[in-house]
Amino acid sequence: MNPEFAEIWSDTWNSHDANAIVRLYADDGIHRMAAGSTYVGSEELRAMVDRSLRGYPDLYFLIRDYQGPSAEDFWERFVIEYTMTGTQREAIGDRAGTGKSITIDGAMIGKLDGSHRIQRCTDYLDHHSIRHQLGLID
């Protein structure tokens, strides 16, 4: 197990540098949300990142566990378990900005390319719990 990629991933998201976050992905990288949305390529990924950072300006990822590429085969599959926290200040999709904070556990499973960038991943995030914590559902 090589924890370097998980650290790079969380440190980059926690920096709130949208350009650096998008550079984590291959130019044709795919980020699929298990709840249904899929973002393909730099332009769509940038829109997803910008929306996330505007919606949660204090967005923070804490790595809970990591299984991933070995130092020898860095482009293998990876799994990152994380806890995401943040306060929703602006609307995201149909979720109005509430000013409420969330703490959500999630997991991302994916594969890196030969350049150590995310070729594809699926992000398993409990959107029902997000809506509940934001007070949008009972």
Image (tube, rainbow, N blue to C red):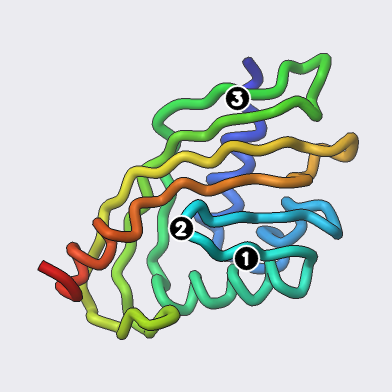
Q: Quadrant of residue 44?
A: bottom right
Q: How many marks?
A: 3
Q: Please tell me which of labels 3 and 1 falls first in the chain.
A: 3
Horizontal side of residue 65 vs 39, given as left or right: left
Looking at the rendered structure, the kind of residue marked 3 is Pro
- Do the residues bearing badges 3 and 2 touch, measured as CB atoms within 8 Å? no
**How crowded is the residue under tag 2: few (<14 C-alpha within 10 Å), some, or many (20+)?**
few
* Precedes in sequence: disc 2 or disc 1: 1
Q: Residue tagged by mark 1? A: 17
Image quarter (top left, top right, bottom left or bottom right) of the N terminus = top right
Q: Which residue is mark 2?
A: 35
Residue 85 in the image: state x and y as whole percent. 33, 55
Q: Residue at x 25, y 60 (%)?
A: 102
Q: Amino acid at mark 2?
A: Ala
Quickly name the residue at label 3: 3
Q: Residue furthest front?
A: 36
